[in-house]
Amino acid sequence: MIDFGRTDRSVVGRWWWTVDRWTLLVLLLTMAVGVFLIMAASPAVADRIGLESFHFVRRQILFLVPALLALFGMSLLPVLWVRRIAVVGFVLSLVLLVGTLIGGDSIKGARRWLDFGGFLLQPSEFAKPTFAVFAAWMLSQRVTQPGFPGYTFATVAAAILIGLLLLQPDVGMTLVVACVWVAQMFLAGIPLFVVAVIAAVGAVGAIGAYALFPHVAARIDRFLDPSSGDTFQIDASLNAFGNGGLFGTGPGEGIVKSILPDAHADFIFAVAGEELGLFASLAVVILFAFLVLRGLVRLLRESDLFVVLASAGILVQIGLQAVINMGVNVRLLPAKGMTLPFISYGGSSLLALAIGMGFVLALTRRRPGVATMNANRSVISRAQVTGVAGIPISQGGAS
């Protein structure tokens, strides 16, 4: 049992009393739910493709160890080092994304992975949280240092990242990155005219994706008109929720995992719906809602614009990714291969998400010294305006 006294001045001791322990607890609970669901969903998938039954379970637990270390390690960092590591990570992610286009493994018609000795690394997963921090740095510099081209740098970075994602192609990941960028630009206070321009560009981009990428058009067509194509996976997912009812068929008793090729990844929420039922599925939704809303509420007390923008960007990314995955599973959104954060199988996804939430935990830690300094500045500022006894003071002296 962890027991640090409030007078403990060690690095871990200070971390324990300043980190958001509720968010940390819910994160660990979500990861545990992920391992449980992968144990339920993946053996049938592994047997179907000729692997040992617990192949995916063992690999996910193996991925979980560095993910937990990354989550803990990043949450220990001061704000300055979060920014430094994220900027280096973003640049490295861009380099690796170029590498996927040159020598990446092609899976299902997309080049998104690099093979490192049997471990398939997906650089785009790491680009999402690091881009959010980089863009937050640029946008906050623009506000704190008038004349600094922060909006331009953030926009150029977003354009480069989006371009590399579209070349893979990965339209779903592009959508997430674009939404993170727009959310951060909005929070940074861009004019409404620019918001309207961005919305128009987004609409044109959506039409362009429909016209240029046949798989995108096919998925949207099947969503709007199920009779226009094969909807087997979505139909099986919906049937799974129907079979599960309120309380589920019981762990290991579902059948959807035996017929869906991605039951341990993109459709793991359907496995939860069938085997655990409606109430357990709603509990998963509540876990993600808590993570996002808890983080955003803590930001309401934050005075550092960089911290607000970076944390909000990562939280938007995780929340949007969860909404897309669960929305696809219940046919509220067109089909899109996207993992359910911290729950679906996938080493790159789990590690990148852990790094991102580690950044959030580090950025939202209570910083008493900073709070006191801001309070003192506020008191001094009010004193300069009102005078010692509340008597207004002009710029030229006491009136």
Image (cartoon, rainbow, N blue to C red):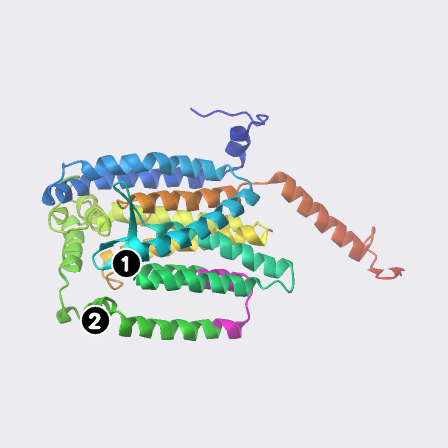
| Residue in view at x 18 percent, y 44 percent | 275
Magenta-highlighted residues: 181-195
Apparent side of residue 212 relative to residue 257 in the rendered image (left or right): right
| Residue in view at x 36 percent, y 72 percent | 205
Vertical order, 399 against 22 (above or below): below
Q: Main secondary structure of the magenta part?
A: helix
Mark carried by residue 194: none
Which quadrant holds residue 116? top left
Vertical order, 227 against 387 (above or below): below
Query: x%, y% of residue 22?
Result: 44, 39
Q: Secondary structure at mark 1?
A: helix
For mark 1, does the 10 Å Cα neighbourhood hold few (<14), some (14 to 19), or many (20 or more) residues? some
Q: Earlier in the sequence, mark 2 or mark 1?
A: 2
For disc 2, the marked residue is: 221
Vertical order, 101 against 215 (above or below): above
- Are dots 2 and 1 in contact, CB under 8 Å? no
Q: Is residue 140 visible?
A: yes
Query: x%, y% of residue 290?
Result: 40, 47
| Residue in view at x 22 percent, y 37 percent | 57
Going by the numbered disc 1, the residue's amino acid type is Gly
